[in-house]
Structure formats: C-alpha cells, structure tokens
Image: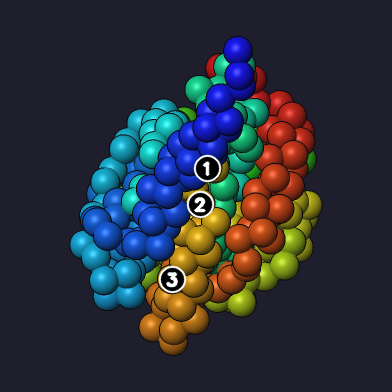
C-alpha cells in the first residue's frame, strides 16, 4: 500500500491548532475577572494584605479583581485549591511563600507537592513573625519573659494561628529550654481575650496583626524572628540579639499553578512590581512591618525551591510531629 503522505501533515496541523488557543489566550490576557485566593478569614492579617493588593491590581489589570477566602487547615485548603486550578492566570495566590514551603513538611501525606505544582510569579515583601505579650503583661523584654516561662514550666502557654508561628514557637522553646504549651487558634484575633485574661503568656503572630494590635494598645511586641532588625520597624529587637538565636524571615509572593504560560507569569510579575514600587505601597508595607521585595519570576522560583528545603530543616529543628 502506498504511504499516505498527508498523514504527517495532518498531525502537524492538528498539533499547531491545539497550541493556538493557548497562545491566543496568553496574548489576550487578561480578558476576564481575576481571583485572588486567601487562606485565612476576612479581617486576618493575610486577608488585609491580599485585599490591599487586590485594590491596587484592579486599575493596572483593567479587570474586576475578586478576593476569595478559602479558609481551613492552616491555609492548606487554599494552597491545594490554587495548585489544582486551571493554569490560565486568573487564579492568583498572594501569600507567604515560606509558609507554603513549610506545609510540605508538616504532613505525612501532603495533598499536593507544592514544589512541583506551584510557581512564584512575583514577590512583594519580606517580613518577620513577632513575639508578643498582652499590653498589661509585666514582661518588657524577651529575657524577662524567658525567665518567667522557665519558672512556670508546663503551666506556661502561648498562642499560634499559622504554621510559621508554630515553628518559631517550637524553636524558641527548644533554644530557651521551655516547657510552655502551644495553643492553636483559627485566627490570631481569637487569642486576644485569653491573652488579656492572663490565660496565655505570649503569642507568635504575623506583623500585620501584631503591630496593629500594638498600635491599638492591646499587645506589646517583644522581638522579631529575623536575625537583623526590620527596616520597617527598626525599634524592635531581634530574637537573636535577645538571646534566642534564629533567623526566620517570611517573604510574600504571588503564586500560580506551575503550568501557567511564561508570558502570563511575566505580566503578573510586572503588575506586582509596579504596585510594590509606589510610595503608597511602601508606606502600607512599613506600617505592616514588612520591607518591599521585588524579584524576577526566575529568582522568585529559586527562592521558593530554597525555602522548601530550608523550612524542612526548621520543622525538623523544631521537632514538630507530622500529622
């Protein structure tokens, strides 16, 4: 039988046609509403951050930008949702890349492999978690708190509401030889009453919440988790200089499904770099205890892969059992 020379040509045309919609889609981006996913409830520090960037993104993207709160499992429900979303640039995940990286090591069977299912399109800020006490607490320094918690033994307790707080709290206990009991809350505000009533001795929370509560006269920030003072809050000592060596910074990025086309990733990167570069956003970040952070998509993804390895070490160092 004579070979049909039209078959290879037909296959080539079919392949080209199958690629055409994706190419056209990238060129037309954005052509529909954009969703920003938040893993914590409205009013939380993460939600405040996401809604700020959503507001600034609307005029730049020229589309409606909607914030959707996918709450639960310490943000892992949101992480899995984005990882399984269509990679078309319409589902964005502005969140702490380090927190997402840590999730890989806190579960025996993580629902998704974040290193293979997500990529970081842009970075926005660098921040630290904060060690806080109630404003009426007698403890004014980390040294005073540590001495009292050693004396209290297992009667001491502290609040956490996110994975970084859990890890930093466990490292603090280990390095300071404390027996304090961790108390997990759905959100940081949920711990305020117990803190005010003296049922909790201290907490480890994100800077948006911690500094906001300090300004409102409810909490006192004792130290930050990085080994260098934040440019945004240079008056706050570090845990290291307070006698508890650690260096855990938490950078925020904008994550998307890993198969998102590069032209769309580059567009998202430009959008957020433009937002972060404005004086208004720099002030917002400073008020939130964060420093601006702009990187290329390639550098951002390198940081993410490094964070997955580093936070695995932190989880092991903190002796946090997997669930």
Secondary structure beneath dot 3 equals helix
Q: Position of residue 89 (x, y in %)?
A: 40, 52
Quadrant of the drawing holding the N terminus: top right
| Residue ID for mark 1 | 259
Q: Are marks 2 and 1 in contact (CB under 8 Å)?
A: yes
| Residue ID for mark 2 | 261
For marks 2 and 1, give the CA distance.
Answer: 6 Å
Q: Is residue 316 left or right of residue 237?
A: right
Q: Is residue 27 left or right of residue 168?
A: left
Q: Earlier in the sequence, mark 3 or mark 2?
A: 2
Secondary structure beneath dot 2 equals loop
- Residue at point 24%, 65% (across, down): 63
| Residue ID for mark 3 | 271
Quadrant of the drawing holding the C terminus: top right
For marks 3 and 1, give the CA distance.
Answer: 19 Å
Specify whether residue 164 is in view: no
Label 3: few (<14), some (14–19) or many (≥20) C-alpha neighbours in 10 Å: some
Q: Position of residue 178 (x, y in %)?
A: 68, 34
Which numbered tag is attached to residue 244? none
């Amino acid at each position: 039988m004579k070979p049909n020379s039209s078959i290879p040509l037909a296959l080539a045309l079919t392949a080209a046609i199958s690629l055409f919609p994706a190419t056209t889609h990238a060129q037309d981006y954005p052509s529909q509403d954009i969703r920003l996913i938040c893993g914590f409830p409205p009013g939380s520090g993460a939600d405040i951050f996401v809604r700020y960037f959503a507001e600034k993104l609307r005029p730049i993207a020229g589309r409606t930008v909607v914030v959707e709160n996918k709450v639960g499992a310490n943000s892992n429900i949101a992480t899995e949702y984005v990882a399984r979303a269509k990679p078309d640039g319409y589902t964005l995940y502005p969140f702490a890349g380090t927190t997402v990286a840590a999730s890989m090591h806190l579960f025996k069977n993580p629902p998704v492999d974040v290193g293979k299912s997500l990529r970081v399109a842009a970075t926005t800020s660098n921040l630290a978690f904060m060690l806080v006490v109630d404003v009426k607490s007698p403890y004014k320094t980390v040294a005073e708190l540590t001495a009292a918690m050693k004396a209290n033994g297992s009667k001491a307790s502290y609040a956490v509401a996110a994975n970084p707080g859990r890890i930093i709290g466990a490292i603090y206990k280990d390095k300071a030889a404390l027996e304090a009991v961790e108390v997990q809350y759905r959100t940081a505000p949920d711990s305020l009453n117990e803190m005010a009533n003296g049922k909790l001795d201290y907490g480890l929370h994100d800077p948006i919440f911690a500094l906001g509560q300090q300004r409102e006269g409810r909490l006192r920030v004792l130290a930050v988790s990085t080994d260098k003072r934040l440019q945004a809050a240079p008056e706050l000592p570090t845990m290291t200089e307070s006698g508890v060596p650690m260096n855990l910074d938490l950078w925020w990025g904008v994550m998307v499904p890993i198969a998102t086309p590069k032209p769309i990733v580059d567009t998202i990167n430009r959008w957020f770099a433009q937002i972060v570069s404005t004086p208004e956003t720099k002030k917002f970040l400073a008020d939130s205890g964060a420093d601006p952070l702009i990187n290329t998509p390639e550098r951002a993804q390198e940081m993410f892969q490094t964070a997955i390895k580093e936070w695995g070490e932190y989880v092991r160092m903190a002796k946090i059992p997997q669930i």
